[in-house]
Amino acid sequence: MRSGSRANRLYAATFAAWIVLIVFVTADGTPVVEWFSKWRRWDAIWYETIWREGYSGRLFLLAFPPGYSAIVGTLSWLFRSPFHVVATTANLLCYLCSCAWLANHLAARFGVPRAAVFMFALSSPVSYFAFAPYSDVALFGALTALIVLGGSTNSRLRREQYWLAFALMVIVPWVRLTGYGLAAWILLRKSYALGTIVALGGWLIFNYWIAGDPIQFLRAQREFGMPEGSFLDGFSRAAANLVPASWPIKPDAQIAWLQFHVLPVLYFGALLASAAWFAMRAEYLLALTILSILVLSHNQAFWRSAVRYDLPLIPFLCIPILSGAQTVNAASRYSRYAVYTIIVLLQFSLQSVFARQFHEGGWSF
């Protein structure tokens, strides 16, 4: 019990320090109200529009399921607070919870330090999106973490646990469409994953009711400049300029090169390798979860936001690096922690650059 309390205090302190870091790299002397409002960019207005006006007259908004807007909007109504303020607060709380839950779970399962998993998750180059009031990926990550924790138990679920898991499977795709990937759990005989099928049926009916077309949500993607195509198209586009034609790259092109080419391919490869690592150790549920989310988050012809979509999977990446570090010789142990430390520092450095660019109005995933 004391160990759990110490871990929670450590998580809270680390998370608070991370918030201070993001404020430090983005504030630049900006007044608090103005600083806060600058996070309200890009799709934030559309999520708030869905809550206030629904989809009527804006069928392209069916690219976004209504779950996030409904939850945040309801909370903003209850607390009599602006939508974007509640959204950012909810995002940060969800992100804290998802990182803490997965850190505890993965640390206990693979014998790695909890603090190391938590820090690795926070260091992701796209963690700053928890401040953006349209980051449904934070809520999606928290719900997915709960599902993973419940699904990883070897004991038979009690009736109330089963129906809670079923309900979560129904809810998650209404927050983020990537949740439909969890239907793959049916392959592992997790029958409550049928909740995603129920959710899909409801979503198709909802689209037909709103737009007269059950797959309007697919057609709506065109309104957001996403070229049509498949996974292979996206991979070829991302890999096309992985090796720049000239070196050094011009300063104004470096960020775009990282965002659209290097990081999407790098994180896709790392997550794919992690899934293989888990599968080789018979951790099929974790491997299948990573693969199913990867398939849906990379299913488009342009991987411009894929790194952000995969934010809930980041904690899994450090497990192959740290697992078994305590059982090997000193040289190997220090090498593993050196690799871990270098990656964390690089990720924090990238996060600072991208957070500042996002806050100043530039595209960052």
Image (cartoon, helix red, strand yellow):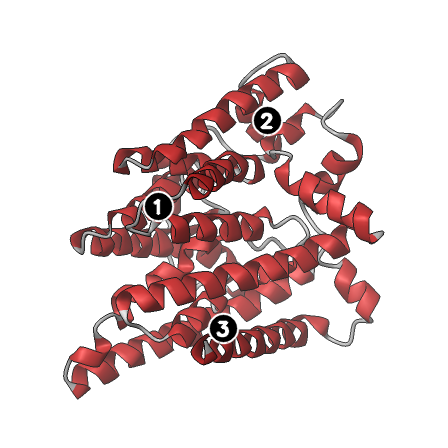
- Residue type marked 3: Ser
User: In the figure, 337 relative to 352: above or below?
Assistant: below
Q: Position of residue 114 (x, y in %)?
A: 39, 73
Q: Secondary structure at mark 1?
A: helix
Whether residue 156 can be seen here: yes
Asked if 299 appears above or below 321 in the picture, the reply is above
Eyeballing the image, is 78 above or below 326? above
- Mark 2 lies on a secondary structure that is helix
The residues bearing labels 1 and 3 have C-alpha atoms spaced at a distance of 28 Å
Q: Please, what is the three-letter code of the amino acid marked with disc 1?
A: Thr
Task: Name which of mark 1 and mark 3 comes first in the sequence.
Answer: 1
Identify the residue position indicated by label 2 in the image: 220
Indicate the position of residue 275 as horizontal and vertical percent values. 27, 51
For this rendering, which residue is in front, 91 or 40?
Answer: 91
Mark 2 → mark 3, Cα distance in angstroms: 35 Å
Q: Which mark is residue 226?
A: none
Residue at (47%, 41%) from the top-left corner?
A: 160
Residue corresponding to mark 3: 349
Residue in view at x 46 percent, y 36 percent: 166
Q: Which one is in front in this view, the residue at disc 1 or the one at disc 2? A: 1
Under mark 2, the amino acid is Ala
Dot 2 or dot 3: first in sequence order is 2
Task: Tell whether label 3 touches label 2 (CB within 8 Å).
Answer: no
Q: Nearer the viewer, residue 74 or 207?
A: 74
Local crowd at mark 1 within 10 Å, few (<14), some, or many (≥20)? some
Q: Label 2 near label 1: C-beta < 8 Å?
A: no
Q: Note whether residue 299 is visible.
A: no
**Quarter of the rendering containing residue 273:** bottom left
**Residue denoted by label 1:** 289
Residue at 57 percent of width and 17 percent of height: 205
Q: Is residue 244 left or right of residue 84?
A: left
Q: Nearer the viewer, residue 34 or 258?
A: 34
